[in-house]
Image: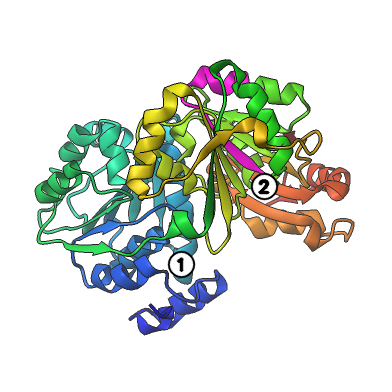
């Protein structure tokens, strides 16, 4: 299929200009197939993997239908995890830049609910959140959905796996019956059709051909003994020397053990699992996204909603119990036209899991002994960036341009030395090239935003 430009859509000139600035020039297959239907108000059930551009489908459709004279909640996006909720909110805000005063509020567990209640009280157009926290707000009366025009169930298969069916039913029961409902799922197990039947009206089904895992991602399976996995992981990192990698583990305790072992070898590593508080999660993800960490060891909480444009490798320290989770994991790499590699450690206990993965993908890749790999020296994965954390974020109306201005004001730090800047609700994160880190730290500590001095920490 020939790529189509966004200019073929009925979008305002200001939005088309904004899309161009953001690098949205031509539509991905899922965007070309689903966007015209979504903008026309049709219900959709769409198969869309992570990294396919699906967020833009529902974001642009919602923004297209928004009534700026109405400050009530007009759209609700439900996501399975807080990480995905934050990622979706950030992308919606970027796409909403074409018009001032569009408000997006994110609600999720792990953040004080009173802060979210305060934000909702002042009016918002779009709410993005996890089912549990959205339901909490409904029960407390801090969220009203009687004027909602569109509901999005993002990664619906994952929400079903996590047991959110009852919460979703409860939430949707208090929205208007004539709403638009957009359901996105990376896989189509039987219960997705049941979900669609209950929640949607005559939906259009959109499914685009997906050669993602076979074309852009190399897949390797290596056999090792159960007690040899740490040694095998070190050999894999030494052989492939990835610029960065996510190492997936099945249990929180395993992430800790693997993280400790890699740190002891001098690897710049952090762990991500469900026991971390929200501030810790934000800091870990910021460091990894900013390339100031080379390895992230994570449970499947990171399999979805991890926004890394160029991730060279994913490593399955433990294979997941469900082949669909394997697909979601490898979807972290090989994105946006880049190539990637997926490397799986397999013990004798994993034979049936490997067979299921091959059956789902209709492939038959060999599993070879990990000893066939040659060591290429010690792996440390020296990261090229340093991340600084600034106390204060969106709530204090911090903006990326202001942070960049503080850093480059005196010409001591060049604009090319400043990388990604992320402004969260309560904190801001900025990446700086290592050679400029010392000067950048001094600039930030003596800088001011809106007349207020900055409290700054270097991470990790």
* Residue drawn at the location 30% of the way across and 71% of the way down: 33
Dot placed on the residue nearer the N-terminal end, 1 or 2: 1
Q: Position of residue 342 (x, y in %)?
A: 54, 44
Residue where numbered disc 1 is placed: 100
- Tag 1, which secondary structure? loop
| Quadrant where the image shows the C terminus | top right
* Residue drawn at the location 25% of the way across and 30% of the way down: 163
Q: Position of residue 323 (x, y in %)?
A: 36, 38
The answer to whether one can see residue 254 in this image is: yes
Q: Tell me where the magenta segment starts and ends, as one range.
A: 244-259
- Tag 2, which secondary structure? loop
Q: Residue 396 lies in magenta, yes or no?
A: no
Residue 8: image quadrant is: bottom left
Colour pattern: rainbow
Q: Is residue 313 above or below residue 274?
A: below
Residue where numbered disc 2 is placed: 290
């Amino acid at each position: 299929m020939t790529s189509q430009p966004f200019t073929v859509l009925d979008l305002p000139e200001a939005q088309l200009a904004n899309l161009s600035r953001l690098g949205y020039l031509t539509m991905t297959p899922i965007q070309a197939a689903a966007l015209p239907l979504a903008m026309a108000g049709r219900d959709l059930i769409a198969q869309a993997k992570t990294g396919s551009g699906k967020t833009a489908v529902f974001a642009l459709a919602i923004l297209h239908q928004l009534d700026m004279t109405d400050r009530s909640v007009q759209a609700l996006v439900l996501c399975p995890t807080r990480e995905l909720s934050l990622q979706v909110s950030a992308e919606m805000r970027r796409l909403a830049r074409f018009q001032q005063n569009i408000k997006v509020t994110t609600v999720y567990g792990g953040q004080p609910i009173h802060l979210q209640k305060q934000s909702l009280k002042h009016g918002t157009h779009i709410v993005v959140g996890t089912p549990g926290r959205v339901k909490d707000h409904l029960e407390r009366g801090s969220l009203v959905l009687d004027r909602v025009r569109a509901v999005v169930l993002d990664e619906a298969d994952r929400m079903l796996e996590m047991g959110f069916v009852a919460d979703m039913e409860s939430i949707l029961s208090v929205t208007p019956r004539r709403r638009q409902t957009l359901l996105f799922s990376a896989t189509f197990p039987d219960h997705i059709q049941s979900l669609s039947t209950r929640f949607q009206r005559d939906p259009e089904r959109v499914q685009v051909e997906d050669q993602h895992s076979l074309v852009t991602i190399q897949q390797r399976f290596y056999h090792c003994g159960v007690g040899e996995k740490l040694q095998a992981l070190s050999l894999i990192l030494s052989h492939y020397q990835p610029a960065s990698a996510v190492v997936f583990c099945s249990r929180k305790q395993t992430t800790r053990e693997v993280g400790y072992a890699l740190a002891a070898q001098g690897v710049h590593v952090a762990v991500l699992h469900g026991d971390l508080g929200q501030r810790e999660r934000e800091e870990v993800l910021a460091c990894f996204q900013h390339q100031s960490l080379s390895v992230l060891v994570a449970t499947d909480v990171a399999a979805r909603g991890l926004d890394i444009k160029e991730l060279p490798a994913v490593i399955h320290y433990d294979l997941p119990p469900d082949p669909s989770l394997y697909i979601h994991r490898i979807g972290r790499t090989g994105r946006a036209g880049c190539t990637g590699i997926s490397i799986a450690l397999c013990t004798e206990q994993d034979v049936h899991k490997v067979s299921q993965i091959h059956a789902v993908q209709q492939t038959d890749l060999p599993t070879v002994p990990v000893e066939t790999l040659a060591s290429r020296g010690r792996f440390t994965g020296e990261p090229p960036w340093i991340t600084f954390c600034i106390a204060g974020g969106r709530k204090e109306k911090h903006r990326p341009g202001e942070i960049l201005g503080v850093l480059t004001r005196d010409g001591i730090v060049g604009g090319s030395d400043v990388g990604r800047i992320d402004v969260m609700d309560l904190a801001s994160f900025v990446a700086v090239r290592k050679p400029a880190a010392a000067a950048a730290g001094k600039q930030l500590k003596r800088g001011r935003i809106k007349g207020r001095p900055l409290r700054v920490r270097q991470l990790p």
